[in-house]
Amino acid sequence: MSVRHLLRMPGALSRGISHFPNTACVVRGTFVLASLTAATLIEIPTASAVPSFARQTGQPCATCHTAFPELTPFGRQFKLMGYTSGGTRCGDGSAKSDETQVPLSVMAWPATFTSVKSNLAPQSPAWQAPNINNNDWIPGQFSLFVAGQLYCNVGSFAQMTYDRVGNSFGWDNTDIRYADTGRIEGTNIIYGITANNNPTVQDVWNSTPAWSFPYISSAVAPVPGVATMLGGTTWAQQVGGVGGYVWINDSFYAEFTAYGALDARLSTDLGANPASSRFANAAPYWRFAYENKWDKNSLMFGTFGMYADVQPVGISALNPVNPTALSYGGVTNPFLDIGVDTQYQWIGEENIFSLRASYIWERQKLNGQSNPDLNGGAPLSNPVDYVNDFNISASYIYDRKISLTVGHFNTWGTSDALAYSSLPGGVGYFTTGSPNSSGWNIDLAFLPFSDGGPDLWPWFNARLGIQYTHYDRFDGSTNNVDEILGLKASGNDTVFLYSWLMW
Amino acid sequence: MKAGGLRRALQTAFLAVLIPAAGFADEVQEKLEYCKNCHGNQAQGFQGYYTAPRLAGQPVQYLENQFEALAKHRRDNPIAQQFMWPGIEGVPLGLRAALARRFNELNPPPADGGPRNLVSFGKAIYNKGVPDENVPACAACHGEDAHGNDQVPRLAGQMYAYTVEQLVGWDKGYRGEDPVSPGETNTMQSIAAGMTKDQIRAVAAYLSYQR
Amino acid sequence: MNLLKSTIAVLAVASSSLFALSGSAEEAHRNCRANPGREWPIDPAAYVVRNCAFCHGPSLQGLAVAPRLAGQHQEYIVNQLERFRSQERNNPFSLKYMSHVAVSVLPGNYCEVGAYIATMPAEARNDGNEALAAKGEEIFRHGVPEDNIPACQFCHGPEAQGVGRFPRLGGQSYYYLKRRLEQWVEGYGRISPHMPGIASKLNPEQIDAIASYLSFLPAAPSPGEY
């Protein structure tokens, strides 16, 4: 019986995102290992620059964004101060006028086009979806945001998304904050509390997974099956977390947030697919960063990480009946992610150059899967597996309106012939026991309204782009990828055209 | 610096002879614009952090005397030291007379005004003096219209703060005694000493509005 | 040329007559004594944090390319807000950022906001080139008489603390000061009757030196606004 969904972490895949429920479960007739790989098949692009913020501050998008969603130092400051700058909904005398501000915005991808190089590439479940073929124009998602000052020092970035491909509606990236400023011994501090549903969605740099490049991806293109839990934003919209942070002297950032996994029913109610894993107890997340700013430059070095006592959910030898119950009862698989990242920006009057890089190291102690006694006599994985995610990207943006970004990604890790295989119990489509995937992305985008929208609607913004993704290695192979004879890794190469509109 | 000044003076004289008059006129114009940075674009006086006095309409002889007093460091109040000593260093000897004439020709309205409520009191003092203190009428030397003449400076339209500063500070000896006619510049010392601060402010206020 | 000079003269007279009564409506905002303004009731301390801090820093000490505002004089702040609003101050960053701010902040609150900002303690940015500071000080104090460059301290004060409409320069960011001087040389925003001409006489080394020197100066008191 297939427990493939154990593998798949609904929600997101890699960068940025709003999770999106998986509708197609590829049933392979294999017993799936519930390792925490971010095997999502639908990549949900990130939520982004929000016109309700522009209305609230009176600033055009380019003040806070280089090319949305990448943030400038001012955008970082706006987020750290709780999304409330420029807000008029507070009786403390801080309102600049009596204008009524409605913190709502709408986002749409009315038209997207995906072309995957080889028609042999079957990973995307969308191929299973009716009426969607390769080289089709399809509408993407539509989102409603409650974004901006809610009241006084409390603000939010809360997204709800309807996905056309999956035909479902649910909550998406959400970050609600309280923030304030203070002065200790002549040093400025900004401090705050964040409640959010996706580790690193609260981060203000674009080198951590939730907001990193590529900022938007096709909902129907194939995607590598393995990533670290942070790197693949595996827990996006599957968790709720509360944490506190400080930003000292506009230079030093420290944050601790504790996440709890949402149970299946709550997940479903919120529109997310029930998770194929959860974790016991609270999972701590931490983030430290140091940023130096001078003239038009900013340079950040940071570290971040998370620890989770992962518990696979689904049918197993111990749990033959209930697909929403824990696979191994009280047994947990401790996962530890430790990342380092850096970001550099030079923001000039006409030109912008930015660079981001991150490396995440993950250790998975697979107490459940590797124990033969828990798996009907044969282990399903190594006792310990490591996964590494490396990302680097560089952008050049001209006049805030034309953006060119090139990025390289690389995932590599322990070969695990049992876990990453098509053998019974394996994840189903890896052929070599290696989780490794690598390649590069290039994105060229046009953002005509960064400095202000058309007269009819000055807060309108748009990003129209074309993206190309190339794979050198996919799911551990360069050829015959995922057991498909003749499918090269580069057969999964994807051309993606998108229109991304915000009101 | 002295060597520098002499060198420049010789240079200027040399150039003034060899280069057509237009070159010299340019130099005068440039130097005039330089002075106007602080003294006002019509030399009406200017209030920056410090007060620069009105030079417009000053008698030529008076201005030339001041050039000399500043260049020789006889006029040595702190502001003169900070600004006028370096400033005058950069003015070649040959330019002084031309500059003085240019300033004399300017006739802008007064720049600044003191407290208006003191004006009539100040006018009375200006025209009658303070007999009890042996302070003669200012009009006697500076003219009824306060335009001065020859070595006696014009006071009409002078910056309020500047006039007050000068009168109040006279007893510090900052104005410097002219060794050629020592009695002249000392005249003001006893006069200033005989006036109270209120009287000084009143006269300064009155003068600041005079055309 | 004469008309221009007269216009400049008139402007100089109007703006420098601190005790003169300038009655025109356009001058009303600039003359905060006559019209302190109170278009919309604000608490200035909370107001600047809510509306200015996300670009200028939590206590307005400056952030990235946004200059320090803390300790800047009311009259200067009000004048600049007017010029951002009218887009007379037209260099690229002013147009990109401040022109929008000056519109969303109500003009009737300019004076109050400026008055509060003037009370905020200013810290030196210390981001200049130390090796050039001595040369910068020489120019700041005495100008360059042989090149007809006046002494900056005459208007800006002996510790560059400024007064009234002359901005406090002491402790401002080296990068910001340098760029402002360069912008006048490049022909942007020729509104001030003085600075475009003065800046145009400076060569790049002098600009570097002055901006460096100024960035290290601690905040010094300024005489009461007048």
Image: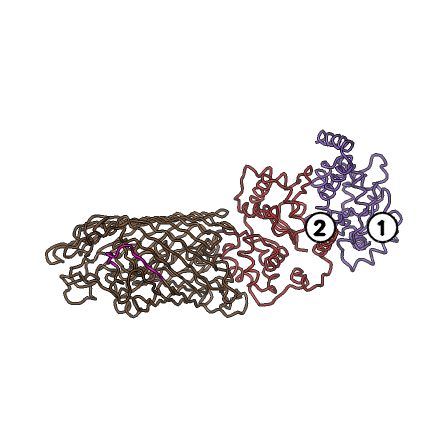
Chain colours: A brown, B purple, C red
Q: Are marks 1 and 2 on the same chain?
A: yes
Label 2, on which residue? B47
Q: Nearer the viewer, residue A396 or B4?
A: A396
Q: Nearer the viewer, residue C23 or A454?
A: A454
Q: Count up the numbered dots.
A: 2
Q: Which residue type does callout 2 highlight? A: Gln
Chain of the residue under the numbered disc 2 shown in the image: B
Residues packed near mark 1 inside 10 Å, few (<14), some (14 to 19) or many (20 plus) = many
Distance between mark 1 and mark 2 Cα atoms: 21 Å
Please name the residue shown 54% across and 39% down the image: C130
Quarter of the image with the N terminus of chain A is bottom left
Q: Is the residue C136 above or below the residue A23 in the image?
A: above
In-image side of B121 versus C61 (left or right): right
Percent from the top left, x then y, of residue A37?
25, 56
Quarter of the image with the C terminus of chain A is bottom left
Percent from the top left, x then y, of residue B164?
77, 50
Of the two numbered discs 1 and 2 on the same chain, state the one appearing first in sequence.
2
In-image side of A78 versus A379 (left or right): right
Please name the residue shown 66% across and 64% down the image: C35
Residue A118 magenta-highlighted: yes
State which region is magenta. A112-123
Q: Is the residue C157 above or below the residue C79 in the image?
A: above
Where residue A86 is drawn, which disc sits there?
Answer: none
Where residue B146 is drawn, which disc sits there?
Answer: 1
Q: Is the residue C158 above or below the residue C87 in the image?
A: above
Q: Secondary structure at mark 2?
A: strand
Residue B114 magenta-highlighted: no
Percent from the top left, x then y, of residue B16?
77, 33
Q: Secondary structure at mark 1?
A: loop
Q: For residue B86, which quarter of the picture? A: top right
